[in-house]
Structures are given as structure tokens and as C-alpha cells.
Amino acid sequence: MATGDITVAVIDDHPAVIAGVEFWYSTADPPIEVVATGPADKAAWVPPGDTADVVVFDLQLSGQPGPSYGALRRLVDAGRQVIVYTMRDDEQAALTCLDIGAFTFLTKAEGKDHLVAATVAAAQDLPYTPPALAGALGANRSSDRPRLSEREENVLIEWFQSESKELVAEKLGITIRTVNTYLDRVRVKYANVGRQARTKAALVARAIQDGLVEVDDL
């Protein structure tokens, strides 16, 4: 997907935040199109927001007694790429959003550059770990880490550092089918401990969280 083709739905109950995000996207190079906005997740379920490539989602919405984890889960379960964009900066919120399956977690203090970069990465299903999420992952070492074989870890790390599975296969001397088999096993193992990792970006986040790889190595 060309960067200029990216479309976004912004879910936030603060008009000033929406206006600022729209301006940031309009001045990106190339521009990113905001096709829908709204104070509730409904804007991401009805046209034109239902086909947006990326959903930028405020975790704290008016009328909700707490974080809108339920709405986030529904979007993720529907296969949407969701960037949580929130005033919250606590580690637990970041890790919970990641566990639900959000593409990434951004605090509103992290600004334009990270939001635009995360949006491009989400649309292209490429890993992106902003500072707040990196800090949360680095501080956390989950006790529910799955048991990966040495070969599974090797394939996983090579995939993170390669542009394609073909390059992984060539470097490790195995077939692309074997690469896919190892990656499928890793996803199954994460799912079995309740930590879904459906995309490459999600697997990167899990690996950082579990100490398999460092942010600086990617």
C-alpha cells in the first residue's frame, strides 16, 4: 500500500484533539486521509469509517466508567488495525491494550511524528514501538512467556530483521514453507497462554516484552 492511500478513523471525544490529529495527517508527506471521526467507536463501524485502514482510538471516552477495553476488543476481533492514542501513560494500560491486540499504544504527549509513523506502520503491517510502549515492555517480564524452541526463536528473530520470509529462508537454509510453519507454531504457543499475536507487529511486541529481542536491535 502506498503511504498516500492510507485512510484513518479517529475515535476521540475531544474536538480539539481530533482537529489537531486531522491537521497532522494533512501535513504528513504524503498526506493521510481522515475519513471518519466521532466520540464513540460507532464511527469506525459505519461508512466511511468501516473501511478505514487504521483506527486511532482514545481509551478514555466520555460516558464510560473506565477504559474502553470492550470497544477496543471488538475492533481488534474484527481484524482492525487499532492505534490506542490516549492521555494515559501507565504501564498496565499499555500492556492490557497490547494483550487485547492493539497494533500499538501511544500517549498523546508523544506527538505528531510518532502518530504519523505508527499510522504508516499499521497500514503496512510493519512493527512500530513508540517510547511509551517500549518503556512498558522493557519494564515487564511476563510469567506467562511461552516455551519456544531454539529454532523457533531463531526464525522469529530473523523474520523481525528481514524484509521478507524469502530472505529468512535463504539465510537459514530452509524453505519458505518451513519458515511459515515455525511462525505458525510461535503464534499458537502465544495464543495458548492467552497472548494473541496475529500480526508481525504483535509478535515483535511480544518478543520485546519477553526479552527475546531489544528495541535497538530492530
Image: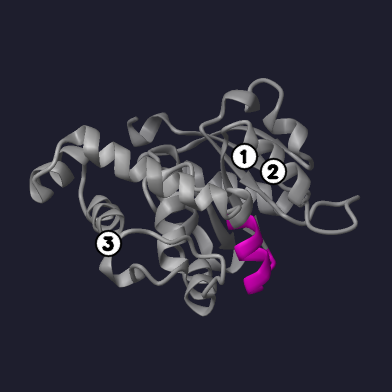
Identify the residue at image location x=22%, y=40%: 165
Vertical side of 127 occupied by 6: above or below: above
Name the N-terminal-most of marks 2 and 3. Answer: 2
In the structure shown, which secondary structural element does the residue marked by tag 2 occupy? helix
**Distance between the Cα atoms at labels 1 and 3?**
30 Å
Question: What's the residue type where badge 1 is placed?
Answer: Val
Question: What's the residue type where badge 3 is placed?
Answer: Glu
Q: Mark 1 points at which residue?
A: 76
**Distance between the Cα atoms at labels 2 and 1?**
5 Å
Picture coordinates of residue 160, whole percent (x, y): 28, 54
Question: What's the residue type where badge 2 is placed?
Answer: Arg
Magenta stretch holds residue 90: yes
Nearer to the camera, 40 or 93: 93
Nearer to the camera, 102 or 130: 102
Nearer to the camera, 158 or 192: 192
**2 and 1 marks in contact (CB < 8 Å):** yes
Side (left or right) of 117 relative to 72: left
In the structure shown, which secondary structural element does the residue marked by tag 1 occupy? helix
